[in-house]
Amino acid sequence: MNLNFRHHQFQRFYNRSTRFMSVPAGSQQIKTMIHNAYRLMILILFIFTGSLSASGTAAQDRKSHTTIILSLDGFRWDYPAKTATPSLNEIAREGVKAVSLIPSFPSKTFPNHYTIATGLVPDHHGLVNNSFYDQELDRPYSIGNIEARFNPIFYGGEPIWITAKRQGVKTASFFWVGSDVDNMHPDLWKKYNQLTPFSQRIDTILKWLKLPPAERPRLIMAYYHEPDESGHHYGPDDKRTLKTIRELDEVVGDFYRRIKQLPNADSINLIIVSDHGMGSISSKRNIALRDYIPKTWPVRIEGGIPIFNLYAPGAWRDSAYASLKKAPHIQVWKPAEVPAYLNYGKNQRVGDIIVVADSAWSVSIARPVKEETGGTHGYDPRNTDMHAIFYAVGPDFKRGYTQPSFQNIHIYPLLAYLLGIQPAKTDGDLQQLINMLRPPAGNDRAD
C-alpha cells in the first residue's frame, strides 16, 4: 500500500466532508473537538480499508501459486546432523526449517500420511494402524489387502485434494496415501508402484508444472518409500542408511534446482516432509505376545512391531488384558486407559486392548527366529526418535526461519492457506504455523 497516496486520499475526503459541518458561532472549542473526532474516525476508516485491500491482494496472489509437498518416508528429524545434506541445508537457508515434525500416534506410515492429508489424528480419520479390524463392518484392513486398501469406507475425513477440487483447484498426487482410493482421486494421480524410480516421479511432476495454466495442478503431493526401507533393514545409525540419506539429498537438490529453472518458479512453494522417524531395535530386546496370549485363545491380533491392536470377545478380553499386564517393557491399555495426549482410543477400530513397546524395545506376535537388529517406528511421539522433518521454501514462506517443533495435524490448514481455499473442519490450527509465513507486506527475514 502506498502510504503517500492514502494520505492524499484521506486529505481530499476530509476537506470535502468537513465543508458540510457547521456549529453555532462562538463555539470554536466544540467545533475543534468535533473536527478532531471526525478526522480520527475517517483516518481509522482509511487504515482499515487499506488493510483489507492488502489482505485481499495477498490472498489473490496465493491463488496463483502452486504448492508441492514431497514426503520422504521415515526421514528422521536428526538425519541431517548425522550426515551431509547440503540440499536440505540450502532449502533451510532460503526458506523454513522446523526443529522437527511431531507425528500422530501411532507413528506409522499410513496413519500419518493420511493425517497430513486430512488434518485429523488417526483416531478421527479411521486409519488407526497400518493394519486393524473394523468390528462394526466385520472387515480387516491392511496395506497388503487390496480390496480393503482401495475401499473408501475405511477412509474418514476430507483429504486436502478433495477440499481443493470442490473449490475449483486442480490437484495431483504421485503415490500419496489415500489418493488412489476408489472415488477419492485427485485430478491427476498414479496407482502405487514402488518400483517407479524417484527420478521418473520427479520428471512427471515437472511435466505437470509445465502444463498450460488451465490444466496445471496447483497442489501436487508426492511420496517416496526411502529412507524408511533402509532404516528398517539396517537401523537409523547404520552407514548404509546414512548413504541413502545422502543420495536422497542429491535427488531433492536436483528437483529443487529444476523447479528454480521453470519460468513460473517464483510462484511455486516446495515443502519436504516425512511421516515419522526411526528407532533402533534388536531381537535381544523383544517381547513375544504368544508368550502371554496362546494360539488357542480366541483373540484377534492386528498391527506390527511395535504396536498391536487386540480384539477379544466377552470374558477373554479381561483374561488377555490380565495376562499381558504381566509382560515387561510394554504398555498395555484398554481404550479408556490410553493417555489423553495420544488422542487415541475412542475409535472402535483400535480394538479392546492396545499394546505398544517401550522405546528401544520391540513387541512381536511370535519370538524372533534369528538374532537381528534394525529399526522400526510406531512408538509414543514423545520419543524424539519418532520425529520427522519439515522444510519449506517459496513465495509464501519466510527466509532463513526456524520453526519450533509442531504436530503434523497442522499441515492440512497450512496447505489450505497456501491454496487460498476454505479448509474443512480438522484437528489442526494454522495459527500454530503463522510465524513461518511471509506477511502481506514488510520485512520477512527472520531475526
Image (spheres, rainbow, N blue to C red):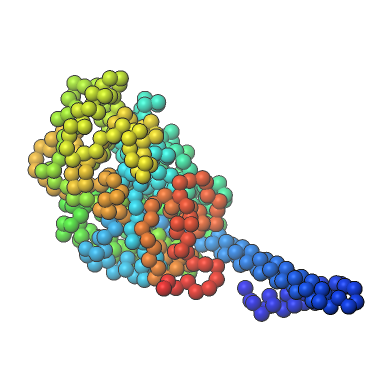
| Residue 50 placement, left or right of 437 | right
Rendering coords of residue 259 (x, y %): 41, 66
Q: Residue furthest left?
A: 371
Above or below — where is 232 with respect to 153?
A: below
Q: Residue at point 48% right, 43% down?
A: 158
Rendering coords of residue 145 (x, y %): 32, 34
Which is more toward the observer, 320 or 92? Answer: 320
Q: Residue at point 55% right, 53% down?
A: 421
* Quadrant (top left/top right/bottom left/bottom right) for the N terminus: bottom right
Above or below — where is 233 with respect to 398?
A: above
Rendering coords of residue 54 (x, y %): 61, 67
Q: Residue at point 75% right, 70% down?
A: 37
| Residue 444 placement, left or right of 60 | left
Asked whether the viewer can see residue 58, the reply is yes
Above or below — where is 237 with respect to 424?
A: below
Asked whether the viewer can see residue 148, the reply is no
| Residue 256 placement, left or right of 247 | right
Q: Residue furthest right?
A: 25
* Quadrant (top left/top right/bottom left/bottom right) for the C terminus: bottom left
Q: How many marks?
A: 0
| Residue 347 placement, left or right of 386 | right
**Image quadrant in which you'd find residue 367:** top left
Rendering coords of residue 322 (x, y %): 22, 27
Q: Residue at point 35% right, 55% down?
A: 101
